[in-house]
Image (tube, rainbow, N blue to C red):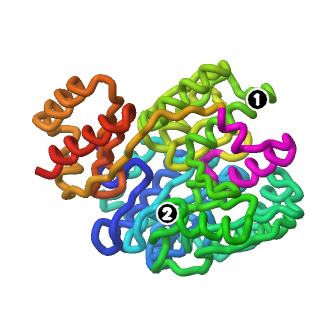
Amino acid sequence: MAKYFGTDGIRGVVNDELNFLLAYSVGKSLATFLTKHKKTKSVIIGNDTRVSADLITHAVACGLCDYGVNVKLIGIVPTGCVSYLSGKLDVGAGVMITASHNAPNMNGIKLINNLGYKFTTADELEIEKYIDLNLPATKQKGKIETSLELVEKYVNFLTSEVGCNLSGVNVALDTAFGSNYKIAEQVFKKLNANVILINNDCCGEKINVDCGALNVNKLTHEVKLHKCDFGFAFDGDADRLIVVLKGGRVLNGDDMLFVLGCYLLNKNKLNSRCVVGTIMTNSGVEESFNEVGINLIRTDVGDRNVIEEMLKNNYSLGGESSGHICVSQLNTTCDALINALYLLKIVKLENLNLNEFLLHLKKVPQIIKNVKVSSDVRKTFDSNLVLRKQLCKLSKKHQNTRIVVRPSGTESVIRIMAEGDPFETNQVVQEIETLLTK
C-alpha cells in the first residue's frame, strides 16, 4: 500500500500531511528516478493559484536541482497544460502543484511522465522508496529558470487545432479562482467569443469555495441573466468540466460522455465502439450507449484508472461523472479547457441542439452523498470487516438498488452512491450514513 501517494498524486493539508521537507524529498526522489531510468534531466513545473503554491513548487524544484536536474517553472497553468508540454518538450517529466478540487488549505503534487501521462502506480511506488532514503546529493547541480513563454505552445494548440471561430457565441466562464483564470479568458477571446467571467481572479484563498465545477449556482444565474449560449465551470486545476446550457440545464461528465461518444461513433473515430466510465457512471448512460451500439467499460473511480484502461486497449474516450473527460486524440489527460472547446466545435460543425440530442439519454435516478468521517475511518474502510459485512447485508436487502460505497482518495469522507427507485435510494443512503457515523 502506498505511503504518500493517493489516487491522484500526493495531497494533503499544507504543513500537516504536506510540507516543505516532503515536497523537497519528492523532488530529489523524482531526480533519482529520472537518473536511474536514463530520462532527460529536465523537468517542467506548473501550479494553480493556491497561497502555498510558491512554497511547494520551490521545494520540489530545490529537490530536483540539488540532485542534478534542471527545472523550468511555467507558472499558473491547468494540469492539461503540463501534460501537453511534458509530451511535446524534451523533458524527463512534468510536475503539477495542485490539490485539484480540494479546499484552499490543501495542496498536492502530481507527477507526469515524458509522454504526458500521469505516473503509474508502479512508478509512484518506486518514487516512494527513494523518499525515505538518505540519498547523498549529487555534486552536479541543476538550474531553476522561469519559462513562462512555453505556455504559448499550449495556447496555440488550443486555438489552432481544437478551437473554432466563436464569433457571436456568448460564453460564461467560472474558473473557480483557479489555474484557468488567465488562459481560459485568453483562449476564448482569441477565438472571438463574447466572454462573461465569474470567479476569475488569481485568489488562491477562495479556490474551489462554493464555485466552479463543485458549485454552479452562480454560473447558472449568470448564464440566464446574460442569455449566454454556454457556461463552463472548471475546478482548481481545470481537469473537471461542468457545462450549463442556455436556460440553465446543467450537464455533468455522464452527459458529456454520451454526447462525445455518439459523435465519435458517427465519425467512425470510436475505437472498438467502446467508452470507458467508472463504477459511478449512471446505469442509464450504459443502457443508452447500448441502444446505439456502444459498450461501456467500467473501472474503479479515478481519472488515472480510466486513462490506463484507455491506453491498455487503445480506446478513444473515457470519463467520470464528476466532469473528468479524456479524448485521446486531443490530450493525454482530462483537460477541461480542451473539452469545452471541443464540445463547442462539435455543436457548431454539426449544428447540434444539445437539449434535443440528450433526449436520447435516459438516466436512472441517482443520489450521491459525501459523509465526513475521521481519517482513521477512511483509511481503515477497506479492512473493516464488520462494516463490510453490514454493507453486504444492506445490499442484499435492497437488491433493486445499485449501491457503491467508497472512501475518498483525497479527503476524510466516505462517498455513497445509490441508484434506482428514488424512495428506496433515499432510504439506502440514510441507512449507510447511520452505519458510517454510529
The rendered magenta stretch, by its main secondary structure, is classed as helix
Please give left or right for residue 120 compared with residue 242 in the image: left
Tag count in the figure? 2
Any mark on residue 99, and which? none
Rendering quarter of residue 78: bottom right
For residue 310, above or below residue 162: above
The verdict on residue 353 being magenta is yes
Residue 320 position in % (x across, y down): 52, 42
What kind of residue is marked 1? Lys
Rendering quarter of residue 74: bottom right
For residue 338, above or below residue 429: below
The answer to whether residue 68 of the structure is visible from this angle is no
Quadrant (top left/top right/bottom left/bottom right) for the N terminus: top left
Q: Of discs 2 and 1, which sits in the foreground?
A: 2
Q: Residue at x 83, y 59 (%)?
A: 159
Q: Residue at x 29, y 66 (%)?
A: 17
- Residue located beneath label 2 in the image: 215
Asked whether the beta carbons under mark 2 and mark 1 sit within 8 Å of each other, the answer is no
The verdict on residue 2 being magenta is no
Q: Residue at x 39, y 57 (%)?
A: 10
What kind of residue is marked 2? Asn
Query: Mark 1 Cα within 10 Å, few/some/many (few <14, many 20+)?
Result: some
The answer to whether residue 200 of the structure is visible from this angle is yes
Element under disc 1 = loop
Residue 115 position in % (x across, y down): 64, 45
Mark 2–mark 1 distance (CA, rounded to whole Å): 33 Å
Residue 52 position in % (x across, y down): 44, 77
- Residue located beneath label 1 in the image: 269
* Closer to us: 341 or 285: 285
Residue 330 position in % (x across, y down): 73, 45
Rendering quarter of residue 307: top right
User: Magenta part of the protein: which range?
Assistant: 332-359
